[in-house]
Amino acid sequence: MSMVLTGTVKADQNDRSSTDGTGDFAIRDTNMPWTIEHDGYTEVLAIAIPRQRIETVLGPARLFASLTVEGHQPVATLARSFLTNLSARADQMSPAVAERMVGVGIDLIVASLAERIAREVPQPVQGSLVVQRAKAYVEANLHDQTLDPPQLASVVGVSVRRLQELFHKRGQHISDWIWERRLAAAAKRLSDPACAHLSIGMLAYSCGFVSQAHFARRFKDRYDMSPRDYRRAQRQDVQSVASAFGLPAYAAE
């Protein structure tokens, strides 16, 4: 990914020509040749992203390589701010935290690309891309307690009714899917040794739940045990494996 921080960059790849200004970014397919020209003084943030991380969501790289994602687009603006701040502060984070933050950054890039691709493809495919863009946005904003179907529809640029129709065609309800992703994220953090220092309440708020009681109720309905019991069970599993291999276990509440 090549994000222009200052100046203008011109590039050619896959029979596409682009001129990227400050704030814009594009993906370059490293399996294919490309040319690039810097117009005067430029500053560019370049990030190598695993091919599979993007193609599993958006399809082959030929669909999006060298498409300019305009920096003024809402998700692209968020991606630029997040990535520039992350690059400046990454060395202050533990490896585990940095890895999770990189995942968030890639999700924002994918969401921005999906928004851009939607302008290039036929209507039937566009519906799938809208859903993928919506899901990528949810993954990057699970902590936002105000996240709901109207807000999500506004972000991806369709009506709430249209977004509901697209989710229903895939056997899903928007609100249910958001809560399912929040619960899945919470379960992952409860089993993550790097999150062992977080209280149940802090973890619940970080996943978008408005209260610890609300989180506990939904979590037990989904996983058939309380968050505390789930964490304890996961900790015991880790300790058993660590003991079997002679490795140190981790401490948790």
Image: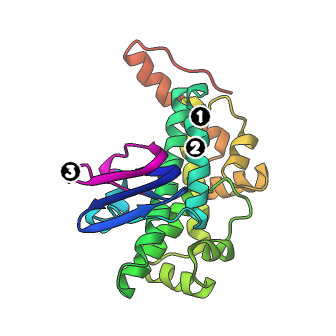
Front residue of this view, candidates 251 and 130: 130
Are discs 3 and 2 less than 8 Å apart at CB?
A: no
Q: Earlier in the sequence, mark 1 or mark 3?
A: 3
Which amino acid does the dot numbered 3 rest on?
A: Asn
Position of 15 with respect to 10 (left or right) is left
* Residue occupying the point 42% across, 43% down: 47
In the image, residue 18 lies at what x, y percent? 37, 65
Q: Which stretch appears magenta? A: 26-52
The residue at which mark 2 appears reads as: 84
Residue 121 seen anywhere in this rendered image of the structure: yes
Q: Which mark is residue 31?
A: 3
Q: How is the image coloured?
A: rainbow
Element carrying mark 3: loop
Q: Position of residue 253 (x, y in %)?
A: 69, 27
Q: Along the polypeptide, which appears first: circle 3 or circle 2?
A: 3
Residue reaching furthest to the left: 32
User: Mark 1 highlights which residue?
Assistant: 88
